[in-house]
Image (spheres, grey):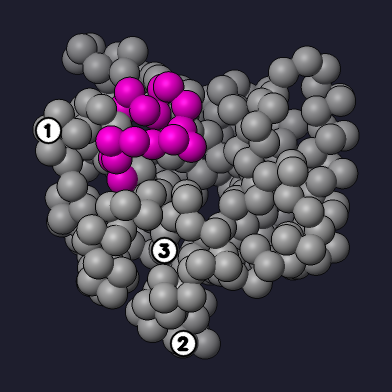
Amino acid sequence: MESSRQSRIQSLFTNLRNAGRTGFVAYITAGDPTIEFTEKLIPVLEKAGVDLLEVGVPFSDPLADGPVIQDAADRALKHNTNLDDIFSMIKHLRTSSELPIILFTYLNPLFQYGVDRFALSCKESGVDGALVLDLPPEESAEYKAAMDKNGLDTVFIMAPTTSENRMKLIADASSGFIYYVSRTGVTGEKSDVSAEIGEKVRLIRSVTNKPIAIGFGVSNPDQVSIIAKHADAVVVGSAIVRHINEFKDSSDIMQCVGEYVSSLVQPLKNEDR
């Protein structure tokens, strides 16, 4: 980071640790189904207890995403949602919200927009950082330099297959937090899943003290509770995006999505760490 002052994301995780609480991270696709809807939804998510928001940049070839998020990107692209729309929306939201926000994007939209321009637009609009899904840390020097120059966090992904040596590389490239993603999901015996997560997270914590956010295909409060035992924050993505699509024709969509997210956040309010 350019400044010694903590970023909005770093402050969040400091406050969570001081409070002994696990954070809740929500993912949504910008422009699904419209950018106007997304702008109205974000305050609802914040009120429901979301601590940090991941905003997906829709892309036509999202190879790392499952079908739910691929479909959301398709819906957003039908309305030509682009980075300028997203930056404008977040800048407007910043007049009334300090919710930490990072962008999830692929390299293609980033390079088409321009790396330096992207970083500057993040700073000017109030975006706090980004995760570039298909950018390995070994190839991130230009991107990281631009983000660092503008005081922005760079988040990178670890997976169950990540080696210990590579963990160190990813941890060094990451600021704000590390995103640990399991491809296996939360299925089968919860105790087995918990042990598997715990073992991997202990290994990650042996190479870094940076916060770890964990996403595991979480869709219900019990799964949130399991992952919260090991994480600094729990990430829920596809389940929220699916909920948005299921209720898209309902006049009560904001209430339905808000209540669903509140139910996921609830275990984190009652946790004993």
Question: Which residue is pictured at 72% across the width and 18% down the height?
Answer: 187
Q: Secondary structure at mark 1?
A: loop
Whether residue 258 is visible here, answered yes or no, is: no
Q: Is residue 33 left or right of residue 47?
A: left
Mark 2 to mark 3 CA distance (whole Å):
14 Å
Label 3 CA crowd tier, 10 Å (few <14, some 14–19, many 20+): many
Label 2 CA crowd tier, 10 Å (few <14, some 14–19, many 20+): few
First in sequence: mark 1 vs mark 2: 2
First in sequence: mark 3 vs mark 1: 1
Q: Looking at the image, do the residues carrying marks 1 and 2 touch, with CB atoms under 8 Å apart?
A: no
Identify the residue position indicated by label 3 in the image.
129
Question: Which residue is pictured at 67% across the width and 36% down the height?
Answer: 182
Image vertical order of residue 197 relative to residue 146, above or below? above
**Residue 92 x %, y %:** 17, 56
**Residue 127 x %, y %:** 33, 62
Mark 1 to mark 2 CA distance (whole Å):
38 Å
Identify the residue position indicated by label 2 in the image.
3
Q: Nearer the viewer, mark 1 or mark 2?
A: 1
Identify the residue position indicated by label 1 in the image.
79
Chief secondary structure of the magenta portion? loop
**Image: magenta residue range:** 57-72
Question: Which residue is pictured at 12% across the width and 33% down the height?
Answer: 79
In front of the other: 215 or 269: 215
* Residue lying at the far front of the rendered structure: 139
Mark 3 to mark 1 CA distance (whole Å):
25 Å
Image vertical order of residue 115 relative to residue 227, above or below? below
Question: Which residue is pictured at 59% across the width and 21% down the height?
Answer: 220
